[in-house]
Image (spheres, grey):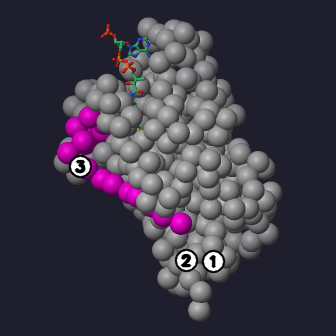
Amino acid sequence: MSKIHAAITGVHGYVPDYVLSNKELEKMVDTSDEWILTRTGISERRILKGEGLGVSDMAVHAVKGLLEKTNTRPEDIELVIFCTVTPDLVFPASANILCDKAGLVNAWGYDLGAACSGFLFGLTTGSKFIESGMHKKVIVVGGDKMSAIIDYTDRATCVIFGDGCGAVLLEPTEEAVGLMDADLHSDGSGRTFLHQKAGGSVKPASHETVDAREHFVYQEGKQVFRFAVTNMAESAATVMERNHLKPEDVAWLVPHQANLRIIDATADRMGVGREKIMINIQKFGNTTNGTLPLCLWEWEKQLKKGDNLILAAFGGGFTWGAVWLKWAYSA
Ligand code: ACO
């Protein structure tokens, strides 16, 4: 019997309507459109407004759209992996809540936390359930409501992040397409540079933690930048080299959208030109787990069966990696 591959057979995304522009941020903190644009490449980002709405509410839109366009019945989904750092609640998992809201009555699911690398980790683990033969329909969701954990008085972080969510359907195929290789890493010694100080079991929420603004993203940007620029590029190059992929073999680089300068450095290391990079950071900012599926969603119509895609990411933890994906269908 030939090997079972896990192929992405559909992708859909959702971003909220509200646009938070650099101009509006200029009124909130001491920053400028020019600084944000030149240092990060971001012009605007989307924000989920409305009482009682969490990341699962964006995911429901993405998943319902995904089921519709792939002609999949909700009851046929067997597993949902929800990659996020901003779950609706500490528990139960947002995957559970999503299954309920989207009518995925026969699915089991769990949340996966690997910061901005979450979608790559989720895509890889989800693929294993397909390749092993255990499941035939797996949904991997990547999304975050970063506005829930961003301090809009901190100019160093509030200009970077936005809200958004994407989802892919994984199904088995005997063709040589789908997830071909993954190079994934974690290094917990980097946790001090990018984290949320309170709200976990080490430092549960208290009046003091709220007063000290410790429930927001804390980031030492320079350190993260230095780390990201090297490791994301190296991981992408590793995947190419060990699979004998030359720059001309790569149809698309799908990079985590954290900073345009980091994206350019990764493309340079791979030898891939700007015309082959998916970039939407200018309008969505860094949606953490949402960046990669949102790129796939936006570029879906341009993708052709057999295209070699290199997905690359890094994030808090530290976590980082790259995935080689052979696209499974032409839109
Ligand atoms: N507007 C104006 N000035 C600012 C702003 C702002 N929004 N933010 C910082 N500055 C100032 C700083 O105060 C500093 O001023 P000083 O020199 O007087 O002290 C100056 O600009 C330079 O600050 P740096 O932090 O050194 O700026 P840098 O060029 O490193 O850019 C940035 C900052 C954009 C955050 C960059 O470091 C970066 O992109 N880092 C990587 C972040 C990242 O990718 N994180 C991804 C992981 S996210 C996740 O996993 C959840």
Residue 194 is a magenta residue: yes
Residue at (24, 42) in percent of width and height: 190
Q: Is residue 178 above or below residue 54?
A: below
On screen, residue 246 versus residue 298, left or right, reads left
Tell which quarter ligand 1 is in.
top left
The residue singled out by tag 2 in the image is: 130
Question: What is the x, y in percent for residue 8?
Answer: 64, 64
Q: What element carries label 2?
A: helix
Q: Is mark 1 on a helix, strand or loop?
A: strand
Q: Which amino acid, by three-letter code, is at mark 3?
A: Gly
The residue singled out by tag 3 in the image is: 188
On screen, residue 315 versus residue 330, left or right, reads left
Q: Which amino acid, by three-letter code, is at mark 1?
A: Pro
Distance between the Cα atoms at labels 1 and 3?
33 Å
Range shown magenta: 180-199
Give yes or no for contact between labels 2 and 1 (Cβ–Cβ under 8 Å): yes
Report whether residue 287 is seen. Answer: no
Q: Is residue 167 above or below residue 312?
A: below
The residue singled out by tag 1 in the image is: 172
Q: Is mark 3 on a helix, strand or loop?
A: helix
In the drawing, what numbered circle is on residue 116?
Answer: none
Say whether disc 3 or disc 2 marks the residue closer to the N-terminus: 2
163 or 256, which lies in front?
256
Say whether disc 1 or disc 3 marks the residue closer to the N-terminus: 1
Residue at (50, 42) in percent of width and height: 270
Residue 242 is a magenta residue: no
- Which mark is in front, 1 or 3? 1
203 or 174, which lies in front?
174
